[in-house]
Structure formats: C-alpha cells, structure tokens
Amino acid sequence: MNVPAPIAPLVDQFGRVHNNLRISVTDRCNIRCFYCMPADKVQFLPRKDLLTFEEISRFVAVMAPFGVNKLRLTGGEPLVRNDLPTLVAMLVAIPGIEDISLTTNGILLAEQAQALYDAGLRRLNVSLDALDPQKFHEITRREGYEQVLAGIEAARNVGFDPIKINAVSIRGMTESEIVPFGHFARESGCEVRFIEYMPLDADNRWERDKVLFASEIIDVLRREIGPLNPMGTQSPHAPATDYEFADGRGKIGVIPSVSQPFCDQCNRFRLTADGKLRNCLFSLDETDIKQLLRSDAGDSVIEQTVRDSLAQKWVGHQINSADFVQPGRPMHSIGG
Ligand code: SAM
Ligand code: SF4
C-alpha cells in the first residue's frame, strides 16, 4: 500500500521524530525475572483498567496519520492476554502501520505462534537470559526453560523471521552465558541481543556495578569464538549495534543503554496497559490517555495531548547522573 507522508510528524523540542510506539497489553506475567518484577505478592491491574483492543486500536489509528508506523506489543507477558492474535489483526489493518513486532518470554509461544502468524505478525523478540536451565531458574524464579526453547522452535517452523533473542546481561551472573549464546547465534540463525541491565527492577536493587557492559561482551565473543564485524546496516534509531561473525555465520547485537545511551536518536514512546502515555522509559510522569479514550474527547484532543507530552520529553535518561531517580513503576508495569 502507498502511504502518504505524515502531515505533521510527532517531533519533540530536540527535533526527534516519534514514529515508534510500544504498546503494553498487560502488566501480568507467568514468570518473575528479578530485574523486572518482585518475586511474589505483585499487585496487578484490575481487568477494567486495561485498555480494550478497541481502545488500543483507536489510539493507533489516531496516531498513524502523524507518522506512527512501527508498533511493538509487549508487557508484562503479552501472550497471557487473552486472544492477542485478534489485536494483531486489528492493528495490521490500520492504514499506515508498516511494522508490528512482539516481545515475549516465549513460554506460551509454541501454542500461539501459528495464530499470531496468521494474524499478520512476522517479527519476534524472545527473551532468554540463559542457556543454562539452572541459571534460567535463578533469574526468572519460575519453571519454563524447555517451553521457551520449544516456543522458539515452533516460531521458526511457522515462518517467523527475524526471531531475535533478548538476553539481559548482569555482572556476576551471566558472564558464563556469553560464549554459549555466541554459538547459539551461529547455529540457530537467531540474532542474540545482549541488553545492559537497567534500573527498572521492582526491588530497587540495581547497581551500576551489576551492569555487564556491551563492550566486554563483544570482547569475549571475539576472543573466544572469532572476529566480529559491525554490520552498519541498521536504522540510526535502532537501539542495538549489530555485529556479524566474519565467516558470515551468526549475528550478535548489543544494546548499551547504560554505557552508551542512544537517547539522541530516540523515536519511541509508550502506552502502558492501563492507558498512560510515557514519553520515555525513564520518565517520572505520565499522561492519561485512557480517560480521553473513555470520554467523548475527539481525535484532535488525543493528538494534541500526545504532542504536549512529547514536548516535555527530556534530552535523555539520567542513569549516569548522581541525580537519577528510578521510575515508580518497574519494567513489567511500564512495558519493555
Ligand atoms: N515479558 C516479555 C519479555 O520478557 O520478553 C515482554 C516484556 S519485558 C519487560 C521486555 C524486555 O525488557 C525483555 O527482553 C526483558 O528482558 C527486558 N527487561 C526487563 N527488565 C529489564 C531491566 N531491568 N534491564 C534491561 N532489560 C530489561
Ligand atoms: Fe515477565 Fe518479561 Fe518481566 Fe521477565 S522481563 S518478569 S518475562 S515481563
């Protein structure tokens, strides 16, 4: 479909154009990664506070004419939301939406992969921090390792391409996973993306010393497996820097959110499962879109509200500053 250029893109005061919307569909999850959720006694949103599929679709349809063309569905664990393929199909049908992807922990993927593909989804990120089952359990505090591997396999058989693996890198914990993941990338055809651990955990236990830096990971892979060349083909807005092994077998990405922030190229904004707009993962305030969607507010009011929020967006996150304040919501409640 030929899509006309946006009439008035969503630009912030630093000239960053926002075309990439991350939509959280739930704050619930079937595992409990320590860097994202508390171990137990989690207060989840009541059902009535979640945006309906119709509300999400309306918001996207209002935004698309202003250049929003990339969507990522996330959570919490998006596959625990009932009937997610129906939402995918609704979003695929919105004129102007060119790219929809999903980030999942993979536990329910084997049973849903075909329906998601049939609904029009093609791109997947599956989170898996460890290839060692015991380490997986240590991080997630739940069972499910075999299901994640089965989910990746099922998604591949259904035809998903690309499938990227997201692995959070934590000093003192995941060093032993670097080389196995390097081999996994070479053998499976899935790009493995190492993400620096960010201060978004529920228990406020993040410390800078626990961040395993992207540069260290690349050094280990070069030393232990072989030369890695930067690919240099991705969009300037991509958070990951991608590399390929020199023999052409295996892609590695690193997301150096802490050591080398990419905020100056940010094109993303977020809608939480309860309908709050966040102009940054680390913002300390939010804008209530749900109450607009549940009132008789017209599309132009919603558009203006988004523009007002983006106008307040900071130049960048403050993780590396002494003044950094961790957001009140942990990652599962924001939507990663
Ligand atoms: N449940 C899904 C999953 O795990 O893929 C989607 C939501 S999860 C919040 C999205 C991504 O954020 C996952 O790849 C997860 O590893 C990552 N993430 C969560 N907390 C993080 C943290 N404190 N630092 C870095 N990445 C984090
Ligand atoms: Fe669940 Fe994803 Fe958070 Fe892990 S990172 S607890 S899978 S929402």
Image: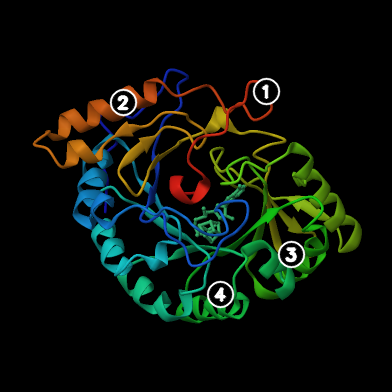
**Relative to 295, residue 151 above or below:** below
Of label 4 and label 2, which has the lower sequence position? 4
SS type, badge 1: loop
Q: Earlier in the sequence, mark 3 or mark 2?
A: 3
Please name the residue shown 41% across and 28% down the image: 285
Of labels 3 and 1, earlier in sequence is: 3
Residue that appears at 80% across and 51% down: 217
Q: Which mark is residue 307?
A: 2
Location of mark 3 (residue): 248
Q: CA distance from mark 3 to mark 2?
A: 43 Å
- Secondary element under disc 2, as helix, strand or loop, is helix
Name the residue tied to disc 4: 152
Q: Amino acid at mark 4?
A: Ile
Closer to viewer: mark 4 or mark 1: 1
Query: Which residue, as the protein is rendered here, is positioned at the far left?
Result: 296
Q: Quadrant of residue 207?
A: top right
* Foreground disc of the pair 3, 2: 2
Residue furthest to the front: 41
The crowd level at tag 4 (other Cα within 10 Å; few <14, some 14-19, many 20+) is many
x then y, percent, for residue 102 = 44, 60
Q: Which of disc 1 and disc 2 is earlier in sequence?
A: 2
Query: Which residue is found at the position 64% from the left and 39% from the top?
Result: 257
Q: From the viewer's perspective, is residue 209 above or below residue 17?
A: below
Could you tell me how far apart the alpha carbons at marks 3 and 1 are, in whole angstroms? Answer: 39 Å
Give the residue drawn at x 17%, y 28%.
Answer: 301
Horizontal placement of 38 versus 244: left or right? left
Q: Which residue is mark 1?
A: 321
Circle 1 Cα neighbour tier, 10 Å, few/some/many (<14 / 14–19 / ≥20): few
- Which badge, 4 or 1, is on the more N-terminal residue? 4
The three-letter amino acid code for the residue at tag 2 is Arg
